Structure formats: C-alpha cells, structure tokens
Amino acid sequence: MSSADALPDGPDLTAGVPLDRLPDGGMLQGHAFGEPVLLVRQGASVFAVGATCSHYGAPLNEGLVVGDTVRCPWHHACFDLRTGEALRAPALRPLSCWEVVHRLDQVFVIRRRDVEFPKQSGPGREAARQPSSIVIVGAGAAGTAAAMTLRREGYDGRVTLIGSEPSAPYDRPSLSKDFLAGTAPEEWLPLHDPLEYDSLGIRLVLGAEVSRLDTSNRSVMTADGRAFPYEAVLLATGAKPVRLSLPGAELPHVHYLRSLADCRGIIAQASSGRRAVLLGAGFIGLEVAAALVERGLEVHVVAPERQVFARVLGTELGDFLRSVHEQHGVVFHLEETAASIAPDRITPAGGKALPADLVVVGAGVRPETHLAERAGLALNNGVLVDEFLRTSAPGIYAAGDIARWLDRRTGRRLRIEHWVVAERMGQAAARNMLGQRQPFDIVPFFWSRHHEVTVSYVGHAESWSRVEVTRSPDSREWLATYSSGDQAIAVATVGRDRASLAAELEFEERNRRTRDRGSRRSAIGASG
C-alpha cells in the first residue's frame, strides 16, 4: 500500500474494539471505510463522528467532550455527538455521523448515517411571528453566519445578503496567515460554494454599497439606487482600517490589510520587493510580518509601544512572542513612529531611514457605523445592542465588529473585533430575529499565529490586577491567567489546547450561574 493509500490512524472500527478501551467520557480515534472516525463514550451510549474538525481539520480526539458535544482543540468549534451538527462557529459544516452497534463486549461502526438535523427550539419561538423578509448588510463573518443560520433554523422567508466586496464571503483570518504566506491557495478561501447560496434561496448581492436605511419604509437603499425591503435587518458592516495622515501615506507601495483585494495587492508588491516595513505591532501586523518572512522578505517593524503585546498578553508572554519573530529575522524598532514615507524608504520620527519596497500599515480599525448613525441608532464606541442583539430601533439588529453588548461575566459593555466572536454573534442574531430570545452571552475567543507558535485566548481582559504565568522549560507550552481581584477573567495559552478549552468551559459555567441568579431575582421580584 502506498503512502497515498494509507489508512487513517488508529484501529479499524468496523472490526470492533473492546468497550473497556473506551472509558466513560473518553475518546478513541480510529477509521471506518477509509475515513477517520472518532468514538466517544457517554455512559451506556457510544457515538461515532468524523474525527477531524470541519473548520481547519483539527484532530478532535485532542479536544474536549462536554455532555453530548465535542469541542475542537484549535479554534473551539463545537459539534453534536448525536448528529454531527456544527453547533458553534467557526465550524460551519457538520461532521459525518456513523452508526454504532454493541456485540458482547465490543462496539462496531457499521455504516455512515444520514442525519436530518432537528430544528432548534427556544423560549417563545412557537408564538413569535417571524419576519417575511430579512436583509443582512455585510457579507463578512457575522453576516454570512447569520444567513446560513436562518436557513438552518428552517426560516423560509426572503433572505438577502449584501456585501460591499465583489468576492463571495471568504475566510478573512487566512488573509494575514496562510494565504498571505503563500501556503494556502485562493480556492480555499470561500466560506461556501457560491452555488450553495442559490440552493438555499439566499440572494447574494455583491459589490454593493449600502447608502441608507430607510426606517420609515423599512427598506435598505444602495448607492446605485436599488431598494431591498425588510421586516428585519441585521447590520454587520464590520470595521475599516485606521488610515495614516503623514507625508507619503498615499504612495502605491503603502498597503492596509482588511479585504481580499488588499491582500492580493500586498502579495503582488511582495513578489517584486525584498524589504518590507510594518507600521504597527498588533496581532494582524505581526501575523503579516511572519507571512512576509515566509515569502523571503526582510521585515522590519516600527511601533510606538515599548513592549510587544504587553497591553493584551502581559510582558512575559509578549516578550516571548517578540523573540519568536526575532529568531526568524524580524527586526523591531519600538518606541518609534513613522514621520514620512518615500517610494523606497520610511523615515522614523527619531531614527535613520529604513529601506522599504513594501509598507503595510496596521494602525487598528474603527467600527463602520455610518449607516447606524444616519438611521439614528444609539451609539457609543459602536452600535449599542441589548442581550438579544437588538438595536434601539425596532426590527434592526447588529452583530460583529460594530456591536457593543453587555458581558455577563464582567458587567461591562464589550465590542470585540474577532472573527469567531462575529460568527457566533451572527448565529445568535439570526435565531433572535426568528423569535427565539436567546441571550448572547458567549465567552470571547480568538487565536493568532506567529511563525510556528499559536496563541489561543479566551475571555476578555481590558485590564487586570495580576497575571500568573506558567511555562514549560523549553517554552513550548504557556498558560497565562489574567485576573481582576480574585476572579480570572481571561486565559492565554500556547501549546495547551485542552487548558484553553477548560478555561472557556469554566467561564461559561460562571455565565450560567450569573444568568440563573438574575432569573431567580426576577422571579422573586415578580412574586413580591
């Protein structure tokens, strides 16, 4: 048998495995009919699903079993063990599902199961009148997840998904990682086959700028004069890069990274250049630095902060990540800003000029709230939404980078610019537009890759009173816990995927307890 024909790892599950090889709550990866299959035992029940996450192919046996679900170790997607259904972004597709039988003290996988996913229910759903038409403004993470969730939930009304870019919805995180580095082809970027939108009855309107929300006539207006009527609308307009205002900032070799077109422009410039300067040392900026190093460029980073990532990750983990970049040849110029840009160089305010064939600016982003502002919605560093992601105007919801919601764990309003948060918010908004009244109280999660090192981060800590860090002697594994007072509010890990999942689960339990206490207080107040 050639290596190309080799079977996946583990035992042949069609030949049976002893039940005692599978402790309660345990997982076993094997294969059936040439495909990788994961066995999971929960009490007397044994489930069999596809063994790799449908998002980026992570091995699910390295994840975490929670009730009748399994969670992905890399990016915290969640799947139903009974049906294989993708319950939580970033996975948008189900796992294969297999039939299991018990014979004596062994379990066998005997065939693939076709599963019809049951429609979800929620408080008040049966009595709620669903809107006859829904328009989603923004075809990024939140908007696309919302459109797909509407159909998944059985909504049969009109769905229109309007995107300002000419490209069909794509995997934006790859723009600063694999695609920019040249290790992932462009055909991997689309979130869905374009034909899938047609098959689901989702009207996809691309390359369209929405100019106005006509709340009186309940219509979304585009700049070219088209009108899209709605009963409910979701604003998922995302964010735009902060642009520099300094001499030379508009030169053609100066780029920002937000869209697929932006990324193509950087790749084209990198193909003919040797030296790149990154202005900014945030997560996206340093992911770009790593990708350009992968393409063989000499990379310098100019940034005003004294230490990399110190504000988000603390000094110890931040210094480690800086050292990772330096080991790959990245040169840092910290406590420095650019004064001007010329066609072949940038000049820092306090140092000598740096040669530059390519300049990439990472100065942060701002929420794209102009539509919300013109429609008279309540704003405060984003669009204010309630626990069901409703804005201050009837029938208008907001999700993704523009939405600012109340976090149950911290009691503060948050607006978080991360892909997974946006997708999960889009899913929640879709269900609430259908009357399910599901409070949005997820635990935020993001990941960032820097050369061979991936950081996973759960929770949210705009500030903390202390950080506790443990790491392995070789620095391959890190666990940083950020606390406010005596309560952990965020956890960052490197090489500790299950610890990251466990922290997420702990934060979710805290949310649940907070929600239950609130329900009890409401009940007591009503009875009194």
Image: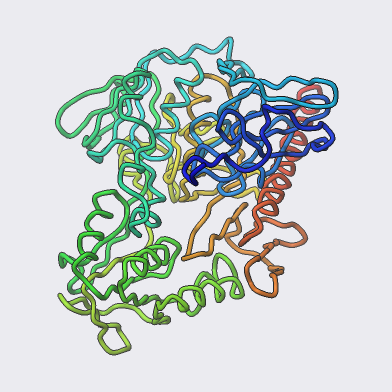
The answer to whether residue 424 of the structure is visible from this angle is: no
| Residue 477 vs residue 35, the one in the foreground | 35
When the figure is inspected, residue 153 is found, relative to residue 331, above or below; the finding is: above
Q: Position of residue 422 (x, y in %)?
A: 47, 42
When the figure is inspected, residue 285 is found, relative to residue 154, above or below; the finding is: below
Residue at 42% x, 67% y is 286
Q: Is residue 471 left or right of residue 191?
A: right
Residue that sits furthest to the front in the current view: 1
The answer to whether residue 342 of the structure is visible from this angle is: yes
Residue at 21% x, 73% y is 357
Residue at 48% x, 23% y is 433
Question: Hey, which quadrant is residue 443 in on the image?
Answer: top right
Q: Is residue 465 left or right of residue 2?
A: right
Q: Please state, as top left, top right, bottom left or bottom right, where the C terminus lies in the image.
A: top right
Q: Position of residue 31 (x, y in %)?
A: 62, 34
Question: Hey, which quadrant is residue 345 in on the image?
Answer: bottom left
How many marks can you see? 0
| Residue 218 vs residue 421, the one in the foreground | 421
Q: Position of residue 292 (x, y in %)?
A: 33, 66
Q: Position of residue 438 (x, y in %)?
A: 60, 28
Q: How is this picture coloured? A: rainbow
Residue at 46% x, 34% y is 391
